[in-house]
Image (cartoon, grey):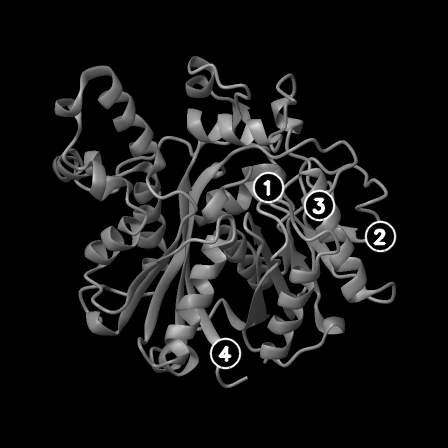
Amino acid sequence: MTDDIAVTGIGLVTPGGTGTEATWDAVCAGRATARTDPVLAEAGAPVRLACRVPPQEPQEPQERVRGRLWRFDPATRFLLTAAREAVASAGLDPGRWDPARVAVVVGTAAGGVSTLEAQHRKLLASGPGALSPMTLPAFLPNMAAGHLAIELGATGPSLQTSTACASGATAIITAALLLRAGMCDIAVAGGTDAMVTPLCASAFAKLGALSRREDDPGAASRPFDRDRDGFVLGEGSGVLVLERTDHAAARTVRPLAYLAGFGATGDAHHATAPHPEGAGLRAATREALVRAGRSPDEVGHINAHGTSTALNDAVEATAIRELYGPGHAPSVTSAKGVLGHTMGAAGAIEAALTVLGIARGTVPPTAGFTAPDATTAGIDIVRAAARPQQVGLALSHSLGFGGHNTVLAFTRAGHG
């Protein structure tokens, strides 16, 4: 379609490593990153498993790092690193673009919750005088987008989206709408979260959402598997550079893929549980395909939300079976077996992995999956090893508390 959006750059910071190649290698190898987390253990959290981003090497001169990084929540640090990689991989130089034509859209589920928790502990222990003056600029939900816009010198629209675990995907949809409306030429869009904290871990555990397989952390996250018992809390950031196709063509840049369509719906069903028949997900899928001008039988691959919880995986599998029927089975994978659930970053990280899969002709495996149960049977889940597959059209699913459903439809560059 003529209004397709070109994906020209990707940046990733995940528990698989810092940088796109580190994450892609970990996901393709099915190398689980879940570990017993010392911070959660020390705090006495009821579940101590987590997927942490490995320590990052400073990407700036040491004197500048000392003067700046203390100001940022970890979620913002992840975002800035991912965005730098995405912009560089797109062949863009912030010193040379028109800053008024560059938009920044960032999704997050919890903002700077790490900062909020740390500063609240200081308040309780030592009183108001102990608080950092950067408390509000570090934890307010909009500030990740604000800090990134400052970092890039981007003066176009600067927005933050929050649709729980669909936030990163919602940011990509919002960026595409800004591009199609002519409000920008370039959009730096993605998601970030750093919710591996005592409060968040304890709250998710209270809901019964987390895996308690602490005796075998590497097998704790098991999307679609018959023995799944919950997700593993993760963190990270994913960023895509999006451009209108005419703008990318004028720069003579070959896109990695195209964002051809997207859909977004609400279940209006339950605060934390998905619609039992996956009605909202199916509606979002149909909307994405209509926007892309495609039919279900053209879908070659689905990067599933695949959280490793009993309800999500059953509902998602049901929706996939009913949408595609017995005559057509797209390959299905979930990265959460490797990376855990990165919350508001998940939709953007998984969109990036979907694009990489299209560009590289490879579908990563679903780590932790060995066999389905009755609720997840009947779909083609990629297991054990990465699968070579030339994909012309792929979908990325993202779902979130509150009944948010988003579906992104990507097509291969040159595939139309």
Label 2 near label 4: C-beta < 8 Å? Answer: no
Left/right of residue 356 with respect to residue 189 in the rendered view: right
What residue is drawn where x is 65% and y is 70%?
A: 392
Tag 1 secondary structure:
helix
Q: Residue visible at 65% across and 46% down? A: 306
Q: Which residue is mark 1?
A: 336
Q: Earlier in the sequence, mark 4 or mark 1?
A: 4
Using a 10 Å C-alpha cutoff, classify the residue at mark 1 as few (fewer than 14 neighbours), some (14 to 19) or many (20 or more). many
Disc 4 residue crowd, few under 14, some 14–19, many 20+, Cα 10 Å: many
What residue did someone put label 3 on? Answer: 313
In this view, the mark in front (4 or 3) = 3
Image x and y of residue 123, in percent: 23, 23
- Label 4 to label 3: alpha-carbon separation: 30 Å
Say which residue label 4 marks: 4
Q: Amino acid at mark 1?
A: Lys
* Residue 374 as seen in the image, left or right of residue 306: right
Indicate the amino acid at tag 2: Gly
Q: Badge 2, how many Cα within 10 Å: few under 14, some, many 20+?
A: some
Location of residue 76 by image quarter: top left
Q: Is residue 56 above or below residue 214?
A: below
In this orientation, does residue 25 appear? yes
Answer with the quarter of the image where residue 240 lies: bottom left
